[in-house]
Amino acid sequence: MGLHSMVDQDSTLKHLQGFIECDLPNPELYEYRGQMNVTNSKCKFGGSLTLTESQLLPKGVKLMNTDWIVGIVAYTGLDTKLMMN
């Protein structure tokens, strides 16, 4: 099950609890490895989901033809991949 099917309604997002484990900040722009772990049973999705660069939106990216997204900030300030490059 993908992340998109997990967030098909607002009520799922309200109950989402968990944590993300990911690489330490690094300058590799096109690589990202992480894991999202959902820890509560109120969501229809439980367990873990692998995160890769296909789920990463680097600083400065402009989304087009997208009605909505759900995002989590993983790196900020000088720790962003763009700032380290």
Image (cartoon, grey):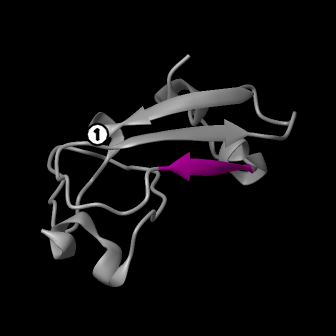
Image coordinates of residue 52 in percent, x first then y, are 36, 35
* Residue toward you, 34 or 55: 34
Q: Where in the figure is residue 73, as x and y percent of width and height?
A: 45, 65
Q: Quadrant of the N terminus?
A: top right
Residue at 29% across / 60% down in the picture? 26
Secondary structure at numbered mark 1: helix
Q: Is residue 20 toward the left or the right of residue 4 in the image?
A: right
Main SS of the magenta segment? strand
Q: Nearer the viewer, residue 83 or 4?
A: 83
Judge by depth and name the residue closer to the eye, 80 or 71: 80
Q: Nearer the viewer, residue 82 or 63?
A: 82
Q: Is residue 35 left or right of residue 15?
A: left
Q: Residue furthest right?
A: 41
Query: Tag 1: residue type?
Result: Glu
Taking the image as shown, residue 41 lies to the left or right of residue 27, namely right
Q: Quadrant of residue 45?
A: top right
Identify the residue shown where x is 33% and y is 83%: 77
Residue range (magenta): 18-22
Residue furthest out toward the bottom: 77
Residue 83 place in picture, x, y as percent: 19, 76
In the picture, residue 32 is in which quadrant? top left
Residue ID for mark 1: 53
